[in-house]
């Protein structure tokens, strides 16, 4: 169990440091900025690389909503749920702390606008003057997390080609970010949202509840849908 929890700490650290780090340091840099596509790829690549590096140790969740969804889908024991979530949050906060220290070295930690320090948000006009409502933000986080968990369960099913599971999951997270960065700055991961909000405070902390509740509910629904509607039984014959 110690190795499993350490794998979740390191995996979630890499996700936040790589994904949020790309958004903080490289997204808007003139001439060399990577933009929405680059940040989306960065998040996908963090999960893809760690899925192959430590997925065989812990299952490669790196996300409380995924762990809870896998419990709902019957793929993970409920007795280990709290330990995994704590490990994921610790890894995420440690990564955000490193990002904060690096930014502080450039005197750039005076966060004031929604989305600063790669935080999640709703109801604020940030991208192209559009402000998405709380209801819109909740729906997109719920739906995308539900589909993310379904993809994870399908890609890691015993009947699936396990060699490509990490690739499918990483590309799914890339697509999720391409869809929702302009809406909420993309969470689908309560630990990732918590870690950035801790250091920004203010509006990020006051809106944090949505980025826990919506992904967790989505994860549960995704897990249940796969378990009861999609999961293949041993005695099923597929043409």
Image: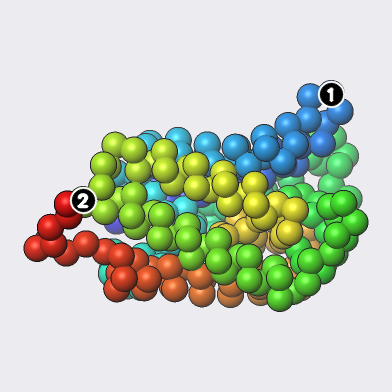
Q: Quadrant of residue 165?
A: top left
Q: Residue at x 53, y 48 (%)?
A: 173
Residue 82: x and y in percent read: 41, 70
Eye-nearest disc, 2 or 1:
2
Task: Report x, y in % for residue 238.
Answer: 17, 55
The residue lying toward the viewer, choosing from 4 and 238, is 238
Which residue is farthest left?
235
Q: CA gap, disc 2 to disc 1?
A: 46 Å
Q: Position of residue 155 (x, y in %)?
A: 34, 49
Q: Check the image and tell me how it is coloured.
A: rainbow
Q: Which residue is drawn at 73% across and 59% down?
A: 183
Mark 2 and 1 residues: CB-CB less than 8 Å, in contact? no
Which quadrant of the structure image shows residue 53? top left
What residue sits right under mark 1 in the picture? 31
Give the number of marks. 2
* Residue matched to label 2: 159
Frontmost residue, 8 versus 159: 159
How many C-alpha atoms fall within 10 Å of the one at disc 2: few (<14), some, or many (≥20)? few
Q: Residue at x 84, y 52 (%)?
A: 127
């Amino acid at each position: 169990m110690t190795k499993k929890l350490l794998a979740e700490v390191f995996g979630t650290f890499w996700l936040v440091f790589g994904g949020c780090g790309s958004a903080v340091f490289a997204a808007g840099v003139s001439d060399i900025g990577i933009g929405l596509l680059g940040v989306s790829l960065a998040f996908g690549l963090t999960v893809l690389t760690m899925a192959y590096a430590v997925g065989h140790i812990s299952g490669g969740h790196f996300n409380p909503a995924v762990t809870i969804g896998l419990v709902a889908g019957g793929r993970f024991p409920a007795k280990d749920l709290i330990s995994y979530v704590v490990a994921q949050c610790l890894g995420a906060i440690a990564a955000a702390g490193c990002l904060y220290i690096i930014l502080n070295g450039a005197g750039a930690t005076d966060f004031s606008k929604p989305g600063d320090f790669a935080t999640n948000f709703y109801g604020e006009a940030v991208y192209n003057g559009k402000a998405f409502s709380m209801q819109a933000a909740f729906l997109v986080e719920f739906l995308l997390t539900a589909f993310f968990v379904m993809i994870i369960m399908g890609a890691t099913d015993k009947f699936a080609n396990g060699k490509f599971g990490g690739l499918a999951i990483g590309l799914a997270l890339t697509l999720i970010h391409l869809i929702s960065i302009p809406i909420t700055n993309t969470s689908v991961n309560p630990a990732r949202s918590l870690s950035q909000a801790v250091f920004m405070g203010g509006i990020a902390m006051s809106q944090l509840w949505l980025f826990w509740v919506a992904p967790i509910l989505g994860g549960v629904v995704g897990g249940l849908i796969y378990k009861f509607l999609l999961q293949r039984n041993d005695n099923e014959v597929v043409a």
